[in-house]
Image (cartoon, rainbow, N blue to C red):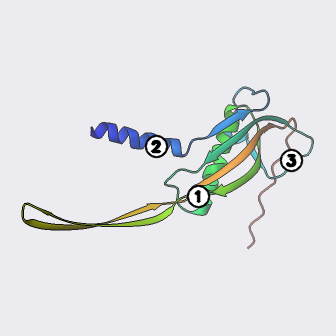
Amino acid sequence: MIRAIVLAATTVLLSACATSHMLVGQPRPPIDVAQVRVYHAPPPGGFEQIAVIETASGPVTYGEQNKLNAVLNNLRKEAAKLGANGVLLQGTADGYGGTSVGVGTGVGRYGGHSYSSGGIGVSISPRTKHATGIAIHVPNPPPPRPAPAPTP
């Protein structure tokens, strides 16, 4: 019984951060994730669309920057599986979540005896971050920008 509950909970947690894609072009052989770049605007020189990708951060990812990093990494991983060397970011959004508190009370009488009870339940669920991108193949990707030099 406990094993079934743990399996069900694990399935829910894993499906909550699932990534999916819809092909709109021809996939290519998979590549290394490190070769996939995220573009915020269409790259110069054109590109070929491969798929639309949707993803979300995990249900226990805390901190806005961590959530953003998680969805961008998920987009890059899925694009790499499709052989895309780029992801054209379409946008991000916050999902549902938050904190809720429930209070319950009960009173009754049975066999000449009275009883009462009460309870409080708290649910804290962080908001997930969702992202959509287009997996693309860029024939001649521009070189990566060098990191700015540290100021003394």
Are there few (<14), some (14-19), or many (20+) residues within 10 Å of tag 2?
few
Query: In terms of sequence position, does the residue under pointer 1 or pointer 3 come before the other?
Result: 3
Q: Residue furthest right?
A: 45
Q: Nearer the viewer, residue 84 or 22?
A: 22
Give x and y (percent) for residue 144.
81, 49
Q: Secondary structure at mark 3?
A: loop
- The residue located at (70%, 37%) in the rendering is 79
Residue 12 sits above or below residue 84 on the image: below
Q: Quadrant of the N terminus?
A: top left
Q: Which residue type does callout 1 highlight?
A: Asn
Q: Secondary structure at mark 2?
A: helix
Q: Which residue type does callout 2 highlight?
A: Val
Q: Which residue type does callout 3 highlight?
A: Pro
The residue labelled by disc 3 is: 42
Q: Are marks 1 and 2 in contact (CB under 8 Å)?
A: no
The residue labelled by disc 2 is: 12
Residue 124 sits above or below residue 152 on the image: above
- Which is more foreground, mark 3 or mark 2? 2
- The residue located at (90%, 40%) in the rendering is 46
Give the image quarter of residue 45.
top right
Give x and y (percent) for residue 58.
53, 50
Query: In terms of sequence position, does the residue under pointer 3 or pointer 2 come before the other?
Result: 2
Q: Quadrant of the C terminus?
A: bottom right
The residue labelled by disc 1 is: 66
Q: Are marks 3 and 2 in contact (CB under 8 Å)?
A: no
Q: Nearer the viewer, residue 34 or 118?
A: 118
Q: Nearer the viewer, residue 6 or 65?
A: 6
